[in-house]
Amino acid sequence: MKFQQLRYLVAVHENGLNITAAARQLHTSQPGVSRQLKMLEEELGFQLFEREGRALTRTTAAGTEIIARATNILREMQNIRRTSAELRKADGGSLSIATTHTQARYVLPQVIRAFRIQYPKVRLHLHQGTSEQIAEMVAKDRVDFAIATGSEELFPQLVRLPVYRWHRAVVVPHGHPLVTAGKLTLKKLAEYPIVTYVFSFAGRSSLPALFETAGLSLDVALTARDSDIIKTYVRLGLGVGILARLAVDPLIDSDLVVLDAAHLFEGHTTWIGFRRSALLRVYMYEFIELLAPHLPRKLVRETEKVQTAEEVNRVLGELRVPLRDSP
């Protein structure tokens, strides 16, 4: 059994059993990948994939187990390389983060600036996307950290640590009827078109469900991933904006009126996550603490020892870790 064969096996799995796509990712030939897979199956004594002609149609039960173990082996090999790099050069390396636009635009700039001052030789890679896109990057082991809100069901393989709480706010242009309509209610909101974030594809969004439960129809004029896009279309009069309160800048957005909606919508918790099997380097612990001062290295290392989200919450609860509101 060769290390190269395990790389080919995992690449084929990650590319949906498409050998051509796997070969392209590995910068090798399709026949070479197919040949190595057949040699691996012959050595193991059983099939890893079912086939129709030359095409792979599904992974066998045995193949699923072998792929899981091969993935862990490849990850440990990556950890060994990282350990070697850390021993040779403690202040250098790379840090890859997948997050949403709101975090990248409104939360991370100050954190990244402070991090760069402390670790100028670390290469930073920032990837933006929806929760589903972030989950895909995590599944393919392309990022060190994921920073997101909710969608816990998409990230069962991560240790997720709470960073801060935030609430939605309603924004309208000056002169909008809601500015003088008194205390905001769902019924009043339902009278106007809504401009808000793209709803999750992994289940019912809490926003539509909230209106539906109240027996109200939600008229969504536009959804976007970008808070700035939402505010742009609110300014154009397309509808009432519902977005994260932290995404409203008092100076830049002075032409908009922020209406308190904390009593209408439940709070949300943004978290930072990493794989349980990951090897965190010194500067990674430092990044977490810069983002969330209530998560020092000693505490994070305690959470690395447990296996489930419930155990992580127990550790945080026992240590009485405070959770701050949005920056």
Image (tube, rainbow, N blue to C red):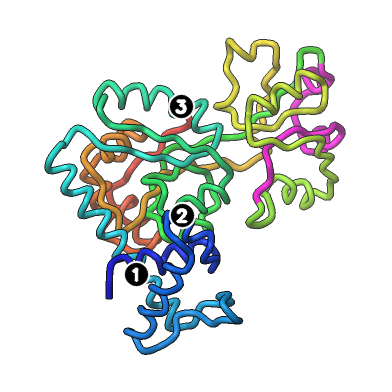
Contact check, label 3 and label 1, Cβ < 8 Å: no
Identified by mark 1, the residue type is: Gln
Judge left or right: residue 207 versus residue 194: left
Q: Residue at x 82, y 42 (%)?
A: 218
Residue 300 image point, x, y percent: 27, 47
Q: Which residues are magenta?
A: 176-200
Would you place residue 43 above or below residue 149 in this image?
Answer: below
Please tell me which of labels 2 and 3 falls first in the chain.
2
User: Toward which corner of the image does residue 164 lie, by quadrant?
Assistant: top left
Q: Residue at x 63, y 31 (%)?
A: 226
Of circles 2 and 3, the one toward us is 2
Circle number at residue 327: 3
Q: Which residue is the site of mark 1?
A: 5
Identified by mark 3, the residue type is: Pro
Q: Which residue is the site of mark 2?
A: 25
Would you place residue 232 above or below residue 298 in this image?
Answer: above
Q: In which quadrant will I find the N terminus?
A: bottom left
Q: Nearer the viewer, residue 163 or 146?
A: 146
Judge left or right: residue 143 versus residue 179: left
Please tell me which of labels 2 and 1 falls first in the chain.
1
Identified by mark 2, the residue type is: Gln
Would you place residue 241 above or below residue 281 in this image?
Answer: above
